[in-house]
Amino acid sequence: MTASQLFKINFIVKEVLRVAYFPDSFLEINGVAMTSNKLTGFVRRRGYPFLCIYAGKKTEVTQDANITFVSLKRSALSFRMDEDLKYDPLFQRHVSLVQKELEKFRPDVFHITGLNDVSIIGAYLAWKMDVALVGSWHTNLHEYAACRLRTKFSFLPENICYSFTDFLEKRILDGAKLYYRMPQILLAPNQELIDMLTEGTRRTVRLMIRGVDTEIFSTEKRTVNDGILRFGFVGRLRSEKNVRILADLEKALFKAGKNNFKFLIVGEGDERAYLEKNMQTAELTGVLEGGQLSEAYANMDVFVFPSETDAFGNVPQEAMASGVPALVTNQGGPKFIVKHGETGFIAKNFDEFVKYSIELIDNPKKLAEMKKLSREFALSRSWDSVFETVYQAYNEAKVFLDGKKKLRKKK
């Protein structure tokens, strides 16, 4: 059987695979950590054998029913990549411990989630132990880096700043493509990334969307009914999220004669000070979790998500589950979630953010219909169906590598 034929296999999971999972983010508050915890919840309910290796507060191995957790402590030389996410240049010191646990567990498949200290160990040991490897793309790291660098070097002339950051963005993306050639099968959250990775890695790339918990995020959690329209945002208050548009939008709405509105902004980051200084109606809550986050979403009327760098966009989907239509840009993954004119709007530029915001202020009947359709859409996005397709990808990677091993033996 040739390698090309193996790609065309109609695969069926005939056995429960033993999976070793290396999430770059697990205890933090972000989309990767949320997806990772949903995955462990899925395998716990199904009783699947699962080994989860992640960066934790201390180095220890624990067992929880069918899941083995390996927590690895980062060193004092770790440096911050985000609000609560770090990178440890000495993380490879844990390789021997991880390999020992892997040999006890005997995985059929490894799963890495990005280019970080945890996943690098996973990629290396998958190669060393000759075990199938699946890689999922969660974060547009190259775009995040470029956005943050543009903010730091904003004192330079614009053409010099953009030439420098565009060059670095391309180099980071080239490095990511090289890294993602190691897995046999890749998972990506939207068609643009599927196309980019297919071309850049020559690997098979499958779609992995994100689910949403429609019980946690629900219209029933709403607690306000004061007639004030609330524009909402949830996420990191960082330059890559383009959050300064929220301040510009507020000014534009005032200029258009609108005043019966507020902004409800959930999250933390170095752009918070700018928003506090430049917005009049904004309530900035900081990071919320659990019931407080559910309530905040449900108290919004229109979700404004101006990020151009998100690979998927978990938060617009959580907003829609709460009955809140979303305004998103035409860049990145969120535009694949929103159905233009039904569950929200896809804005091509800032003027369209203003236009659609005014339309929803002036047309409460239209807004009410979009709220209903947003909730209906979210009800179709179950996490179980997402992870069932992930397990199909695991099986496909194993079948492919097993075929390659047979070819090597024949030679």
Image (tube, rainbow, N blue to C red):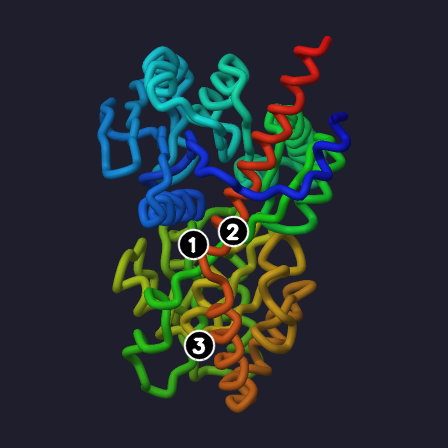
Give the crowd class for mark 2: few <14, some 14-19, many >=20 residues within 10 Å: some
89 left or right, relative to 196: left
Q: Can you say which quadrant of the picture contains the N terminus?
A: top right
Q: Mark 2 and mark 1: span between their CA atoms?
A: 8 Å
Q: Mark 3 and mark 1: span between their CA atoms?
A: 17 Å
Amino acid identity at mark 3 = Asp
Placement of 192 over or under 285, stated as above or below: above
Residue 314: % across, % down: 48, 56
Q: Tell me the quarter of the picture where residue 162 sits.
A: top right
Q: Residue at x 43, y 26 (%)?
A: 107
Residue 37: % across, % down: 36, 45
| Residue designated by label 2 | 241
Placement of 133 over or under 245, stated as above or below: above
- The dot on residue 235 is 1
Residue 101: % across, % down: 33, 19
Residue 29 shows in the view: no
Which of the marked residues, 3 or 1, is nearer the chain's N terminus?
Answer: 1
Q: Can you say which quadrant of the picture contains the C terminus?
A: top right
Q: Tell me the quarter of the picture where residue 184 sits.
A: top right
Dots 2, 1 in contact, CB < 8 A: yes
Front residue of this view, candidates 347 and 16: 16
Q: Residue at x 50, y 70 (%)?
A: 250
Amino acid identity at mark 2 = Lys
Amino acid identity at mark 1 = Gly
SS assignment at label 1:
loop
Q: Residue at x 42, y 29 (%)?
A: 20
Give the crowd class for mark 1: few <14, some 14-19, many >=20 residues within 10 Å: many
| Residue designated by label 3 | 301
SS assignment at label 3:
loop
